[in-house]
Amino acid sequence: MGFDDDFGSAPPGGLPPPAPHTHVEADITDLAHVVGAVLEADYTAKGDVLVASGASTPAALAIGANGSVLTADSAETTGAKWANPIGYPLNFGGIALIGDLGKFWEYEGESNAATDGTLDQRTEATIPKTSTLVALAWNSASGDSTTVVKGYRNGIVVVTVAWTAAFGVVAGLSVPYVQGTEKIAWEFDAGTAPGESTLTPYFEAA
């Protein structure tokens, strides 16, 4: 018993061949263009960082200058920016040596001072936003080597130190302060009291 030669039909007791399919590539999803995907094209330069300007809104933040650090800033579109790191003076046993008065910004008597700079009665002064501050020192026309003062930061004693000279800036706090928000104060503790009108904080520029 024979069968015809049409190979497109099933032989006796066999299965038919599969139907031809000439457009398989059309069934493959193009993943590169799925909505919401982060594309290689979003990064345009070496060092770009992925951030977000809002919910489900990725964006690339260009790399900052050499030595800069990434910091949060709600005023920025992406909520972040590159900024210079803050440096602090060397710490010697809890006291940071300050240096030449010529590079200091004096708080008392300045037109942009928020409060009186006389701090020997623990008058708190808010560190102003108009300068970059990293350390605090003092100067008094009264006092001697027996004079001991306390330094406060937001109401907490952060240092207790003795005068080493009657005049001039002699030392500073190694504790960093945040401009515009933190409150500082000096308080006479023991020995010869400094003059009320001459106890003046100085801030070291970064």
Image: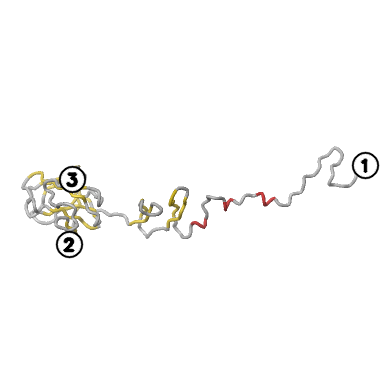
**Which quadrant holds residue 158?**
top left
**Front-lying residue, 80 or 74:** 74
Q: What residue is shown with label 3?
A: 152
Q: Residue 144 location, x and y as percent?
A: 7, 51
Q: Tell me the kind of residue under disc 2.
A: Gly
Q: Position of residue 45 (x, y in %)?
A: 46, 60
The residue pinned by badge 2 equals: 102
Residue 89 appears in the picture as rendered: no
Residue at the (17%, 55%) spot, across then down: 107
Q: Residue 67, position in %: x, y? A: 35, 58
**Quadrant of the snapshot with the N terminus:** top right
Task: Give the camera-side residue of 149 and 163.
Answer: 149
Looking at the image, is mark 1 or mark 3 earlier in the sequence? 1
Pointers 1 and 3 in contact (CB under 8 A)? no
Q: CA distance from mark 1 to mark 2?
A: 114 Å
Of the residues under marks 2 and 3, which one precedes in the sequence?
2
Specify the quadrant that holds the C terminus.
Answer: bottom left
Image depth: mark 2 or mark 3 in front: 3
Circle 3 Cα neighbour tier, 10 Å, few/some/many (<14 / 14–19 / ≥20): some
Q: Is residue 93 above or below residue 61?
A: above
Name the secondary structure under disc 3: strand
Q: Which residue corresponds to the image point at 55% horizontal and 50% vertical from the top-left? A: 35
Q: Which residue is mark 1?
A: 2
Residue 87: image quadrant is: bottom left
Residue 21 shown left or right of residue 195 in the figure: right
Verify CB contact (< 8 Å) between mark 1 and mark 2.
no
- The reply to whether the C-beta atoms of the residues labelled 2 and 3 are less than 8 Å apart is no
Answer few, some or many: residues within 10 Å of disc 1's Cα (few below 14, many 20 plus, some between 14 and 19).
few
Which-is-in-front pick, marks 1 and 3? 3
Q: Residues within 10 Å of mark 2 (few under 14, many from 20)?
A: few
Q: Amino acid at mark 1?
A: Gly
SS label for mark 2 = helix
